Image (spheres, rainbow, N blue to C red):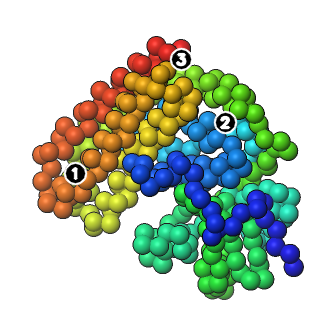
Amino acid sequence: MTVQSVLPLDPSAYTPHALHAAERMWPETNCYVDLWIEVLSALGIAPEAMLGFTLTQDFEGDQFTFFKVPLEDLEALYGIKVTELAIFDSVEAHIREQIARGRLCLVEMDSFYMPDTRGVGYRQEHGKTTVGINSLDLENRRMDYFHNGGFFSLDGADFDGLFQHNAPDGWPPFLPYTEFAKFPAERVEDNHLRGTAERLLRFHFARRPSENPFAGFANVFPQQVEAVAERDFSYFHKYAFNTLRQFGANFELLASHLLWLGGDKRFGDEIAQALRLSELAKTVQFQLARAVTRKKFEPLKTAIDPAIDAWDRLMAGLSSKIE
């Protein structure tokens, strides 16, 4: 049986997009945004255009917003229509049908069985993550897929684990949340991307948090750190991912969006403030690890204060240029 693919890609020859370059402060952000960066790159269109939504990130009390590109933005910018796929047969049957139609399925799966997470989650810890399945070979139990900052393949026992082929009798059916993406017949033009991105930047700026999110975070950060220190050290990684890494990666992507849209000449000060936020997240993450290990929290009491200033300066600067 011929194995079909959505896009003609070879995992062994794949080069990730520059937004995932190793020299960036946050080479990976979160699974959903990272996936779309690579899918758009593989389609030959600029993923930087979609990143205006990063302006809306807020502090949610126990975490920063897990930032995801709105599906409406994908359609407005690129003509890509994404919707939920109903699962009423085997997951593999649905995916194979959509691949045959040239559609990419985005499926929530268990990173425990994904070799690309080796050293982090692979065969160590179960975790939910989203992958984009480009090809599926049922006979040889092989899958090529987008995940995080790259394009990979897996097979054999990992394939069986992902699709729960060895689940015991009576085990609940495998019904992962699944979306599928319909790509347009023709690639959009650059002038359309830039015009739409300008409009969406203004739209998302109007949706920014009404209060400085870092002021709220600073108020609870010392207490949260002390609580983290009472847990197993593995919890530190979960806390840091959902707070410091989320806002650090978010604002580095915002800087990349502003650089793509207007460059240093137009947005130089705002790019600098966004990168200041991103760098601060990296610095505080190291400080947090030391504090949790040593049980010394005093240095962290004012650690978030510079972020309050940076966010205010960033928003004030954008207000003067895009409203």
Alpha-carbon span between mark 1 and mark 3? 36 Å
Residue type indicated by callout 3: Ile
User: Judging from the image, what secondary structure is the residue with disc 1 in?
Assistant: helix
Numbered tag placed on residue 210 in the rendering? none
Mark 3 lies on residue: 322
Of 144 and 269, nearer the camera is 269
Of 128 and 154, nearer the camera is 154
First-in-chain label (1 vs 2): 2
The residue positioned 40% from the left and 18% from the top of the image is: 316
Residue 10 appears at what percent x and percent y?
69, 67
Q: Is residue 178 above or below residue 144?
A: above
The residue positioned 46% from the left and 35% from the top of the image is: 255
The answer to whether residue 55 is left or right of residue 188 is left
* For discs 3 and 2, the disc positioned in front in the rendered view: 3
First-in-chain label (3 vs 2): 2
Q: Is residue 302 above or below residue 16?
A: above
Residue 142 appears at what percent x and percent y?
70, 77
User: Judging from the image, what secondary structure is the residue with disc 2 in?
Assistant: helix
Is there any visible trace of residue 126 in the rendered image?
A: no
Mark 2 lies on residue: 73
Specify the quadrant that holds the N terminus: bottom right
Numbered tag placed on residue 287 in the rendering? 1
